Amino acid sequence: MEVCLFFIGYSNGMHPEPRDIDISLIQAVSQNVEGLRHFVIHRSIESANGDPQSNEHALKPRWALQWYFDDLGPAEAVLQHGGAAHTIVEQTIDAAQDRLAFAQQLMAVRKFATPNAFGTSNPSEKCTYLVGYEGEAQDFNAWLTHYLKHHPPLMAQLPGIRELEIYTRVDYRTGLDIPQATAMQRNKVVFDDSAGLAAALASPIRAQMKQDFDVFPPYSGPASHFPMHSIYGNLQRT
């Protein structure tokens, strides 16, 4: 199964306005990551059109990087001492000048078809809604069974949706000296722009998703929802 390595930067409470990350640095390092299939860089955006069904106040990610691999082996390799992940973390931490707190998490990827998928086109920049279930389900098997059966069919009906992925945590080895995030599940839905996301969040489908959420198996903990400006990486192998 495909796996995705998440690097996430959160605002340091002492510095609410962190420096921006160097996109060119991440792009350059990613060109030489053995086994990397593709990558996406997300930066937080402020949206006046928030999710009308969401009222939580979770810790907000300012930046996130996704590295996709075909399986666990090459993903773990880049996390070991001397691996490419260390270059990313060290240089972004230096650039942030202690204004960001970093976390890592390796997760299994489930992709779902959408009626407006990218097809053969290569996207460059989009708007992503990142969702994180960072608590615990009372019975994760019951939770995931219900979720995968009922929620993706609704999500795929969101107007203008381009991409839909659901991630679940896996056990993995790492040599990075930054905290390991423990989100039980993450989701990603992608739209052309922030206006497309706002329209989807205000749609009747989003209300149906909230109704389904209300009958999920028992879960305790935050469910974070954040809009992100996403840049799709272009791997130029030689």
Image (cartoon, rainbow, N blue to C red):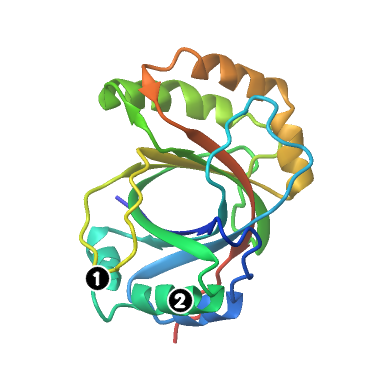
Q: Which residue is rendered at x = 59% and y = 76% of the image?
A: 22
Q: Residue furthest front?
A: 14
Give the class, few, some or many, for how many residues have Cα within 10 Å of label 1's Cα (few <14, many ≥20): some
Is 93 located above or below residue 70 in the figure? below
Q: Which residue is rendered at x = 43% and y = 17% of the image?
A: 216
Q: Which residue is rendered at x = 63% and y = 70% of the image?
A: 19
Is 89 located above or below residue 159 in the figure? below
Is 53 located above or below residue 5 in the figure? above
Question: Looking at the image, which is closer to me, 162 or 20?
Answer: 20
Q: Which residue is rendered at x = 71% and y = 20% of the image?
A: 204
Label 1: which residue? 77
Residue 6 as seen in the image, left or right of residue 192 = left
Residue 27 as seen in the image, left or right of residue 125 = left
Q: Amino acid at mark 1?
A: Ala
Mark 1 or mark 2: name the one nearer the start of the chain.
Answer: 2
| Label drawn at residue 30 | 2
